[in-house]
Amino acid sequence: MNAAAKCGRLMEHWIRLHWFELSALVLLDLNLLFVIKVLSVLRAVQDGLILLARWLDIARSDTDRQPGAGTDAGKH
């Protein structure tokens, strides 16, 4: 029996013995990937809301600068 075959059998035996730990590591990695993706989406939503709030604030300040805006003085 050569060294490569012996190493292959040892690796196969090790995987059979530790399959539960390996699968748990794979699930933890997938969970971490999912959390990273969710956090990036939440960050993008937050950036979008900040831009929307700035745009609404600019629109509101433009409306406030117009003469008679928001009052009944301009109607008379």
Image (spheres, rainbow, N blue to C red):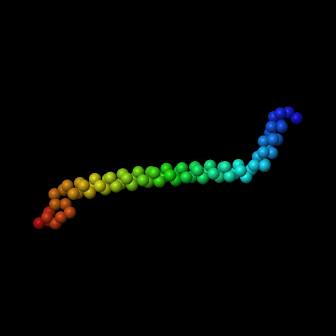
Q: Residue furthest right?
A: 1
Q: Nearer the viewer, residue 42 or 76?
A: 42
- Quadrant into which the N terminus falls: top right
- The residue sitting at the left extreme is 76
Q: Residue at x 19, y 60 (%)?
A: 69
Eyeballing the image, is 9 above or below 69? above
Image-based side of 49 in relation to 7, left or right: left
Does residue 9 appear left or right of residue 57 in this picture? Answer: right
Task: Name the spot of residue 55 as percent of width and height, x first.
Answer: 32, 53
Quadrant where the C terminus is found in the figure: bottom left
Q: Is residue 42 left or right of residue 49?
A: right
Q: Quadrant of residue 4?
A: top right
Q: Return the residue nearer the eye: 3 or 74.
A: 3
Which residue is painted at 78% across and 48% down in the image?
Answer: 16
Q: Residue furthest top?
A: 2
Residue 19: x %, y % from top left:
74, 50
Where residue 34 sits in the image (x, y, percent)?
A: 57, 52
Q: How many marks are shown on the rendered structure?
A: 0
Q: Horizontal and vertical percent for residue 3?
A: 83, 33
Q: Residue at x 70, y 49 (%)?
A: 22
